[in-house]
């Protein structure tokens, strides 16, 4: 098992990519603490994960709540070997139609809260630990209407590199996983029905060289790699798990002869 004896903290671990990663970590031998805002979802996730997991209700934008969650994780399982700062929110912020509050909420959740999550974890991190930040293809694609989201995810890239510089003396690695479109609850507002989700998935597939939407497990397995000793010499990297959407856009199905 690749994470035998390791301890991990996953924010937003009660659904989607976070929960898929938590399940994989437990399977690979880790003890995992997950956080989330929805008590019912947390309880359901905890039941799925079993005795090797702790679920703590915490809003990542509440610094005191995250500090408490980290402290509880360390009290239950010992010092941390892995932090996956996964929690985040979508949010359309088009020019000409966005309030200051809406813009700042996206930045606060997706960028500021990640910094304070890592800062809260720092006193509890073992030397040689791995920190993974959850980025996005939106940081580079220029999708209309998503300025705050794109800025927050591009900010993670820059922040990860600074953190890597600061933490390298302790052999702590900091990397970014950047998913493309994946089948997760993040789409619930954009595609609230099964029919709408099917249309959205078809659109994402058409814009992806591999011709399909990602499953949460695709991203989880990349996070596992970055968390494990297999990635022992990978530092300040960003791995796109997007079926080629950013690296080979000319390979999308529409351009095939």
Image: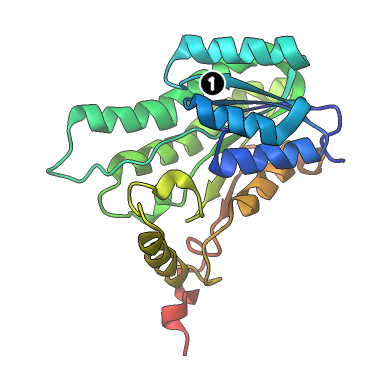
Q: Judge from the rendering whether residue 83 lies leftward or rightward of residue 108; answer left or right.
A: right
Q: Where is 101 relative to 248, above or below? A: above
In which quadrant is the N terminus drawn? top right
Give the image location of residue 191, x and y in percent: 35, 54
Please, what secondary structure does the residue beneath circle 1 have?
A: helix
Give the class, few, some or many, for how many residues have Cα within 10 Å of label 1's Cα (few <14, many ≥20): many
Q: Judge from the rendering whether residue 160 lies leftward or rightward of residue 172; answer left or right.
A: left
The number of discs equals: 1
The structure residue drawn at horizontal position 69% and vertical position 49%, both measured from the top left corner, is: 221
Q: Residue furthest bottom?
A: 257
Give the image location of residue 81, x and y in percent: 74, 25
Instruction: Give the image quarter of residue 86.
Output: top right
Instruction: Give the image quarter of residue 28.
Output: top right
How is colour applied across the structure in the image? rainbow
- Residue 199 vs residue 11, the one in the foreground: 199
Instruction: Give the image quarter of residue 2.
Output: top right
Q: Judge from the rendering whether residue 255 lies leftward or rightward of residue 83; answer left or right.
A: left
The structure residue drawn at horizontal position 64% and vertical position 51%, both measured from the top left corner, is: 217
Which residue corresponds to mark 1? 117
Task: For residue 116, say whether it is visible.
Answer: yes
Task: For residue 176, say whether it is visible.
Answer: no
Give the image location of residue 168, x and y in percent: 69, 25
Q: Where is 202 relative to 54, above or below? A: below
């Amino acid at each position: 098992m690749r994470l035998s004896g390791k301890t991990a903290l996953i924010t937003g671990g009660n659904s989607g990519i976070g929960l898929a990663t938590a399940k994989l970590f437990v399977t690979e031998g880790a003890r995992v603490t997950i956080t989330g805002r929805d008590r019912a979802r947390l309880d359901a996730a905890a039941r799925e994960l079993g005795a090797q997991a702790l679920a703590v209700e915490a809003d990542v934008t509440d610094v005191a709540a995250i500090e408490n969650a980290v402290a509880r994780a360390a009290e239950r399982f010992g010092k941390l070997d892995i932090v996956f700062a996964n929690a985040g929110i979508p949010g359309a912020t088009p020019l000409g139609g966005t309030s200051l509050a809406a813009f700042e909420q996206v930045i606060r959740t997706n960028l500021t809260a990640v910094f304070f999550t890592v800062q809260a974890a720092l006193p509890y991190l073992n030397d040689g630990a791995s920190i993974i930040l959850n980025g996005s293809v939106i940081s580079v694609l220029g999708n209309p209407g998503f300025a705050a989201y794109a800025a927050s995810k591009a900010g993670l890239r820059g922040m990860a590199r600074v953190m890597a510089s600061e933490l390298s003396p302790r052999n702590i690695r900091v990397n970014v996983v950047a998913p493309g479109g994946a089948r997760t609850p993040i789409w619930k507002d954009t595609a609230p029905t099964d029919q709408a989700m099917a249309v959205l998935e078809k659109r994402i597939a058409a814009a992806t060289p591999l011709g399909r939407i990602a499953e949460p497990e695709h991203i989880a397995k990349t996070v596992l790699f970055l968390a494990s000793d297999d990635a022992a010499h990978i530092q300040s990297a960003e791995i796109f798990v997007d079926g080629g959407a950013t690296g080979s856009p000319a390979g999308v199905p529409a351009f095939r002869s």
